[in-house]
Image (spheres, helix red, strand yellow):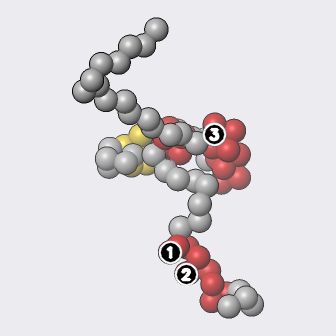
Amino acid sequence: GLSYEAGDALGVWPSNDPRLVQSLLVALGFDGEEAVPDRTGNPTPLRLALLRDYDITRIPRALLNHVAPFTQHL
């Protein structure tokens, strides 16, 4: 039922898998209601931030750099 005309814009916002978010919350011992900053810096519940504001599927380079000295694989 959607129709588009020249000049219309379409936005696509990805989200993380809710099952992955739930698994992460359980592993960390959080209930998901803890307040954290969203992508604009405004407080939002952790569960919502993990669903839509944070990339939880890639390991940040800063974390890899921090952990690397403790490994045997250089």
Q: Is residue 66 above or below residue 34?
A: below
Q: CA distance from mark 2 to mark 1?
A: 5 Å
Of mark 2 and mark 3, the one earlier in the sequence is 3
Secondary structure, mark 1, is helix
Q: Is residue 15 visible?
A: yes
Q: Which residue position is annotated with label 2? A: 65
| Direction from residue 72 to residue 29 in the image, left or right | left
What is the three-letter code of the residue carrying label 2? Asn
Examine the image and state in which quarter residue 65 appears: bottom right
Q: Of the two numbered discs 3 and 1 on the same chain, state the one appearing first in sequence.
A: 3
Q: Is residue 60 left or right of residue 19?
A: left
**In the depicted view, which residue is nearer to us: 49 or 73?**
73
Q: Are marks 2 and 1 in contact (CB under 8 Å)?
A: yes
Q: Residue 9's quadrant in the figure?
A: top left
Q: Return the mark for residue 62.
A: 1
Image x and y of residue 73, in percent: 73, 88
Say few, some or many: other residues with alpha carbon within 10 Å of mark 1 (under 14 / 14 to 19 / 20 or more). few
- The residue most toward the left is 7
Residue drawn at 52 percent across, 73 percent down = 61
Q: Nearer the viewer, residue 13 or 3?
A: 3
Above/below status of 9 relative to 42:
above
Q: Is residue 65 above or below residue 17?
A: below
Q: In this figure, which residue is indicated by the disc labeled 3?
A: 17
Secondary structure found at label 2:
helix
- Which residue is rendered at x = 58% and y = 53% of the image? 56
Q: Amino acid at mark 1?
A: Ala
Task: Say if 54 sits above or below 69 in the image.
Answer: above
